Image: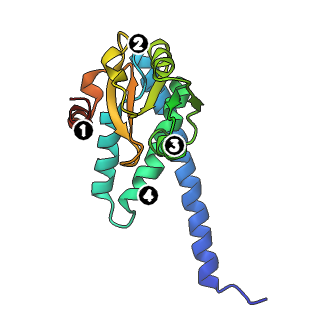
């Protein structure tokens, strides 16, 4: 067995110290997010705020000099998902008759691995769940125009998935929380 160079030991010690500092900051961030949720109260909408989340990722990616945008997006989406789950237990109701695997993975990327994904038997079932709780309906585009009959209070707020097997996102969402690019994509699809 070879000896570890002394500078490698020092670098590993520095990584351990950075990990400890990151954990402390992470726990502070979770505590602040809980306080934000307490102050906001229950407005009847999803705790999900896509426009704010996108702005956070874009701001941090713009500041980064070494970390890739993909790394930043992945790490912060997971952080935000855990914060959101501590505020309210959100789930995704997935209706995907042909592209379930791809859309399940797209949902995990978008909403974090902590967010439960529950299969729905129909678009109506997914939308009903979205109307009544902290649920995002993720419904594959399959030729039916189900979005014309959204329950009261439920809005389309995004497009997700690969070109073949795309899906729409629906839930109790204020228009002000929907990113402009998602509004434009939705108009193209549901027009």
Task: Please report whichever mark, 2 or 4, sits nearer to the chain's N-terminal start.
Answer: 2
Colour treatment of the image: rainbow
**Residue on which disc 4 sits:** 71
Q: Residue at x 58, y 38 (%)?
A: 114
Inspect this view and state whether residue 173 appears. Answer: no
Q: CA distance from mark 2 to mark 4?
A: 32 Å
Earlier residue among tags 2 and 3: 2
Give residue 44's mark. 2
Q: Which residue is mark 1?
A: 185
Q: Quadrant of the C terminus?
A: top left
> Which marked residue is nearer to the observer: mark 2 or mark 3?
3
Label pair 2/3, CB-CB below 8 angstroms: no
Residue at numbered disc 3: 108
Instruction: Tell me the CA gap for discs 3 and 1.
Output: 21 Å
Q: Could you tell which of marks 3 and 4 lies nearer the N-terminus?
A: 4
Coordinates of residue 121 in the picture (x, y in percent): 56, 24
The quadrant of the picture occupied by the N terminus is bottom right
Q: Are marks 4 and 1 in contact (CB under 8 Å)?
A: no
Q: How many circles with numbers are drawn on the protein? A: 4
| 144 left or right of 78 in image | left
**Secondary element type, mark 3:** helix
* Circle nearer the viewer, 4 or 1: 1
């Amino acid at each position: 067995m070879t000896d570890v160079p002394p500078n490698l030991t020092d670098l590993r010690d520095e990584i351990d110290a950075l990990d400890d500092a990151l954990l402390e900051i992470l726990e502070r961030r979770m505590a602040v997010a809980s306080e934000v949720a307490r102050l906001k109260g229950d407005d009847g909408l999803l705790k999900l705020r896509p426009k704010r989340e996108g702005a956070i990722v874009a701001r941090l990616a713009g500041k980064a000099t070494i970390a890739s945008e993909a790394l930043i997006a992945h790490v912060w989406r997971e952080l935000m998902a855990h914060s959101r789950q501590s505020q309210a237990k959100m789930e995704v109701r997935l209706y995907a008759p042909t592209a379930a695997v791809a859309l399940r993975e797209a949902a995990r990327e978008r909403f974090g691995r902590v967010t439960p994904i529950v299969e729905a038997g129909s678009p109506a079932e997914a939308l009903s769940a979205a109307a009544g709780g902290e649920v995002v309906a993720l419904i594959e585009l399959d030729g039916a125009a189900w979005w014309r009959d959204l329950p009261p209070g439920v809005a389309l707020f995004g497009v997700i998935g690969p070109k073949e097997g795309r899906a729409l996102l629906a839930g109790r969402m204020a228009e002000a929380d929907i990113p402009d690019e998602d509004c434009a994509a939705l108009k193209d699809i549901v027009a």
